[in-house]
Amino acid sequence: CDEQYLFVSDAFSTAAGVGLLLMFVNGWMFDRFGGYILSQVGAVILAIGFALLQVPLLGAQSGHDAQTRSWLVVAILIADTGAVLNTISVFSIAFHFPDFPA
């Protein structure tokens, strides 16, 4: 159990670190394409990440977690990328409500 906890903890820590590094790219994409396009792309990427998350979960249920555990890191990174894109896009929605500052 300790080994599994450390692996999942490392996966989430890696995703958080990569997410912070990609904030510059996300800011550039927000300025370049706008919040509307970025929110749609982010939603699609997040859905792909959640779909890929089923691979390690089903692998663990069927006893093949040794073969499918590397998909956990990939799925978390993809889902985190989509979530960050959606989070940044909230600022474009908040812009349309000047009477209610965030």
Image (spheres, grey):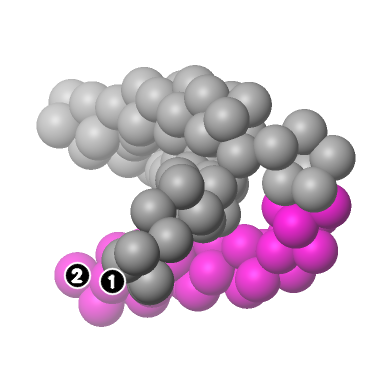
Q: Nearer the viewer, mark 1 or mark 2?
A: 1
Under circle 1, the secondary element is helix
Q: Quadrant of the N terminus?
A: bottom left
Q: Which residues are magenta?
A: 1-28
Q: Is residue 52 visible?
A: no
Q: Along the line of sight, which residue is nearer the eye, 74 or 70?
A: 74
Residue tagged 2: 1
Magenta region includes residue 4: yes
Q: Position of residue 24 (x, y in %)?
A: 80, 64
Q: Which residue is mark 1?
A: 5
Task: Please tell me whether residue 71 is drawn above or below residue 100 in the rendered image.
Answer: above
Q: Quadrant of the rendered structure where residue 57 is?
A: top left
Mark linked to residue 35: none
In front here: 30 or 81?
A: 30
Q: Quadrant of residue 19?
A: bottom right
Q: Amino acid at mark 1?
A: Tyr
